[in-house]
Image: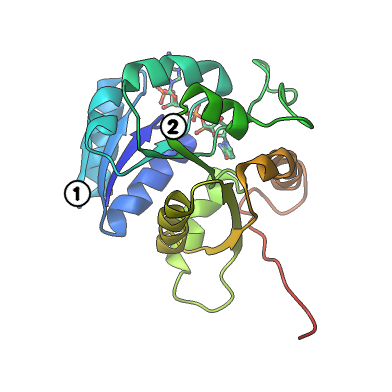
Amino acid sequence: MRIGILGSGLMGGKLGTLFARAGHDVVFSYARSEQKLEKLAREAKGGARAGTPGEAARDAEALLLAVHWSRVDDVLKQAGDVSGKVIMTCSLPMSSDDSGLVIAHTSSGAEALAKKVRRAHVVSAFGTVPSEVLFGVYEARRRTNRPSLVYCGDAQRAKDITASLIRDVGFDPVDAGPLRIARYLEPFTLLIAQLAYEGEGGPELAYRFLRYGK
Ligand SMILES: NC(=O)c1ccc[n+]([C@@H]2O[C@H](COP(=O)([O-])OP(=O)(O)OC[C@H]3O[C@@H](n4cnc5c(N)ncnc54)[C@H](OP(=O)(O)O)[C@@H]3O)[C@@H](O)[C@H]2O)c1
C-alpha cells in the first residue's frame, strides 16, 4: 500500500518506519528539517522516501495524520486535495500547552477533522498507545496475545484498510464503531498516557481487551 505520513515525529516517524518494514511504500513528510525526513526514510529501509505533504498525499491510498492539534490546518493546507483518501488520525485535540483536550464530550478531534476534510474518509486509530511501545509490539508480533488497538470510523473500506495496517504493526484491531466513538477513545488515550508517563514501569505500555463467557 502507498502510505503518506503527515507529521514525522514520535508517532509518524515510528509508524511510518514500521509500515515500511511491513512492506508498504511510505512517504515521510512534515518535519522542520528535510534531513530528518531523509534519515527516517533511509533507516526505515524498504520502500520509504522523504517528501512534501503534497507529495505524501498525492498517490497515497492512506494517510497518517500525526501532528500536534495546533498544526492540523497547516499540514492539511500543504497536503492539498485529499478527496477520497483514507486519513488515519492519531492526533489528539490537545491545547497548545498539552494540559487538556480542547474538544470533548459533544465532539472529538477526529470528528472535527472529518468536517475539515469532508471528502476524505477519517478513521481514528493508532493514538491510544504511546510511541515508546510501538517497536516492541512490532518485534513481538509473532507471539500470541497481541495487544489490542481500538479504532473507529464511518467508512467501512477505510476501516478495513486501517485494520489491516494495525495488524501489520503487531496489534489486534478492535473496531469500536462509528467516528463519533472517538469522543470516548480520545479521553481513554489520556488515561493511557497517565499510566505510561506517570505510572510505574515506564512508557512501553499497551493494553488488551478480554472477553469472558461464550
Ligand atoms: N507521542 C505519543 O506517544 C502520542 C501518543 C498518542 C497520540 N499522540 C498524538 O499524535 C500527534 C503527534 O504526536 P507526536 O508525539 O508524534 O508529535 P511530534 O513528535 O511533535 O511530531 C510532530 C511532527 O510535526 C512536525 N512539525 C511541528 N511543527 C512543524 C512546523 N511548523 N513545520 C513542519 N513540521 C512541523 C514535527 O517536526 P520535527 O520532527 O522537526 O519536530 C514532527 O515531525 C499529536 O497530536 C499527539 O497528541 C502522540
Provide the secondary structure element on which disc 1 rests: loop
Q: Residue at x 79, y 32 (%)?
A: 105
Q: Could one spot residue 52 in this view of the protein?
A: no
The answer to whether 106 appears left or right of 94 in the picture is: right
Disc with the residue nearer the chain's start (1 vs 2): 2
Comparing 11 with 123, the one in front is 123
- Mark 2 belongs to which amino acid? Gly
Q: Residue at x 49, y 27 (%)?
A: 67
User: Eyeballing the image, is 143 above or below 96?
Assistant: below
Seen at 59% across and 75% down, the residue is: 145
Q: Position of residue 176 (x, y in %)?
A: 65, 55
- Which one is in front, 48 or 40? 48
Residue drawn 60% across the image and 65% down it:
147
- How far across and down, in percent of the image, does residue 161 sit? 40, 55
Residue 47 has which mark?
1
Quick one: quadrant of the C terminus? bottom right
Q: State which quadrant residue 179 falls in.
A: top right
Q: Amino acid at mark 1?
A: Gly
Asked if ligand 1 lies within 8 A of label 2, the reply is: yes
The nearer-to-camera label among 1 and 2 is: 1
* Neighbour tally class for label 1: few under 14, some 14-19, many 20 plus, Cα within 10 Å: some
Specify the farthest residue to the bottom.
214
Observer-nearest of 12 and 102: 102
Image location (x, y in percent) of residue 37 = 28, 30
The picture places residue 63, in percent across and down from the top left corner, at 37, 38
In the image, taking residue 156 as reference, residue 61 lies left or right, namely left
Secondary structure type for disc 2 = loop
The answer to whether marks 1 and 2 mark residues whose Cβ atoms lie closer than 8 Å is no
Using the image as rendered, state which of residue 23 and residue 10 is in the foreground: 23
C-alpha separation, residue under disc 1 versus residue under disc 2: 19 Å
Q: Which residue is mark 2?
A: 9
